[in-house]
Image (tube, helix red, strand yellow):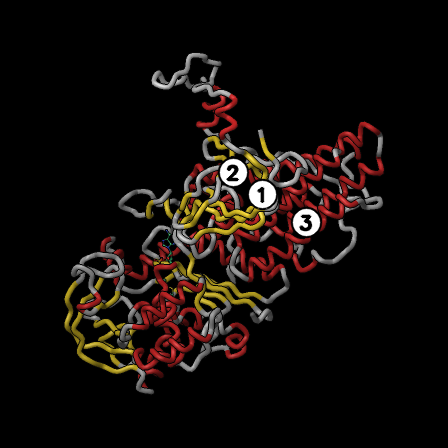
Amino acid sequence: MNQNYFYVTTPIYYVNDKPHIGHAYTTILADVLARYYRSLNVPTFFLTGTDEHGQKVQKAADARRMDPQAHCDETVVRFQELWRKLGITNDKFIRTTDAAHKAVVQEVLQDLYDRGEIYKAEYTGWYCVGDERFFTEKDLVDGKCPECGREVTRIVESNYFFRMSKYQQWLIDYIETHPDFIQPSFRANETLGFLRKELSDLCISRPKSRLSWGIELPFDRDYVCYVWFDALLNYVSAVGYRRDQAMFEKWWPASYHLIGKDILTTHSVYWPTMLKAMNLPLPRTIFAHGWWLTGNTKMSKSLGNVVNPMEMVEKYGVDAFRYFLLAEMAPGQDASFTEEAFIARYNSDLANDLGNLLSRVLKMTLRHLQGVIPPAGPLQEEDRELLQTVANAVDAMEQALHAMKCDQGLAAVLNAVRAGNRYLEKTAPWTLAKRGDTERLQTVLHTAAEALRQIAILLLPVMPGKMTALGEALGFDPEEFAAQRIAELRQSGDFISGRVMRDTDGLFPRIQTEEKMQKSAAPVPAASPKTAPKTVLPGVADLITIDDFFKTQLRTAEILAAEKIDGADKLLKLKIRMGQEERQLVAGIARYYAPEAVIGKHIVVVANLKPAKIRGIESQGMLLAAKIGQELKLITVDGEIASGASVG
Ligand code: MSP
């Protein structure tokens, strides 16, 4: 990828809807990418905005007996306010009702019309109001819209058409020879599947008699422009197309158009053919992310299960919300949003792991060194190891961003956080203090504080507020810390000695859930009468003999590789080593562990379980894990022992 500049866009959102988690996700993802590229010193332009023309908006305005422009002016504020609350750092907010955008759209229309790329013809077909798209008889599914399943209306009228069909073969060739163009690659295949059928020309006008809310066609005042044709052009009009050549050349072609999977065809077929007709290069990558579901159910207004980002932010804070969305969704696949999953991840990653690391370093430094971060003495193997794990996380994050795998980048950073906690357990600075080994104590606290500094800089783009606070806790001025760049993380030097740590009120206070509070006080369930054995220990049902127990062969194993399974968001496929033997396991742990977070762990496996096929993949055993409520932890081995050792 051309690393000289980075231009990222979100879809422009229809103004008539309340912003929901889907809108928030794409915009936060774009924001995090923009902040990362800026942090890597890459000139960056981040565009978002609103789609304000078309039937949906006109209908919404009519229902409120308002002029459509006044309706848009009022509702656009919801998006602008939410973006402010979410810390979005877009360089421009485009509205398709901006005079500058409208003028560019009209020039493009006139130019394409003059060059014969747009022609007039009589059209008969089926129209879906919801999707604002025409369909032919054979496109319909059970007589309904193939996209949304709603009723369609038969329409006969004269309209203007863009000669999209003539670019069909060119587009197929382009997609086939540019693997980065549509991502993830299965979306490229989906587009190619669509292009295998005959492509029709695109109806780009609406007669004013039916819809007046749109940009007027410059060559026929009885028509307005089709809303998608107008909307897609925002990506070029916003960066100076036909107005500011220098600006346009600086930013076009875009690096990434981020979109949801439901608007793939408009972006991967309409838009490239429009650009081709305009003689413009195509964006480098159109990236279609999956959907946020509530549990396993599609979010919909009628089900009343749409997550309102404003509410989540008010309840849990903007940084935790941004972190959750980015860490939880593997871009490209669907993800599930539940408040329980949110709390579980918050408590485990932020309150426990990151919060703990900071609070340990802070407490020890305040108690033993008057809060002043000391210089390091000679480094030992374990110090170097921790700093190396953090350096690996810097690399992993950068690679993950280029591959649009932010969830994996964050998992690598959290891995470094956990390594920091293990480092403190191993080096035990509290014992060093007791023993009076000040030199080693200073080196350990210096190393842990330096690891924290780098981790905070790596996480700044995702949690700008909380990580600036972490920087403050490490003795930095907040403005100075917020301006720290990932590009400088690889420089060697001492950046922290002499800084005075400041006590923070707990960066990520643990969220207490009602379920948890009840559980800790809950009585242990009694055995059911059917299975109650003769001997009953308090809290234990169904006693077994030692022979029963030894029927299960438990053995230690090392995880060599792990990957997600397409279409199964709870499962990971693991390759494990058990002594001399390698096996494959399918484990339901994907909600709790990212694949790279489990590699290298020494776990406990039921070795004599009959192999079973899970989602068509053979699982040769079962791993052990502890689960309570929404939390799950792998059972791992304390210390070093060869894999394949028997457990019992
Ligand atoms: N106005 C068009 C886009 C024009 S771009 C030139 C539009 N707007 S929208 O407001 O309806 O949708 C905006 C985005 O929200 C789409 O990318 C859509 O995929 C996304 N989402 C809507 N519901 C979603 C989820 N539940 N989860 C994730 N994203 C979802 O389409």
Q: Position of residue 173 (x, y in %)?
A: 40, 78
Q: Give the Cα distance between marks 1 and 3.
A: 26 Å
Q: Give the Cα distance between marks 3 and 2.
A: 32 Å
Taking the spot 44% from the left edge, 36% from the top edge, the residue there is 340
What residue would you read off at disc 1? Answer: 578
Going from N to C along the chain, the mark reached first, 2 or 1, is 1
Q: Amino acid at mark 3?
A: Thr
Answer above or below: position of 222 versus 84: below
Quarter of the picture containing the N terminus is: bottom right
User: Dividing the picture into quarters, in which one does residue 171 lie?
Assistant: bottom left
Taking the spot 50% from the left edge, 77% from the top edge, the residue there is 244
Answer above or below: position of 23 versus 545: below
Taking the spot 51% from the left edge, 45% from the top edge, the residue there is 318
Left or right of residue 605: residue 505: right
Left or right of residue 419: residue 523: left
The dot on residue 389 is 3
What residue would you read off at disc 2? Answer: 607
Q: Amino acid at mark 1?
A: Met
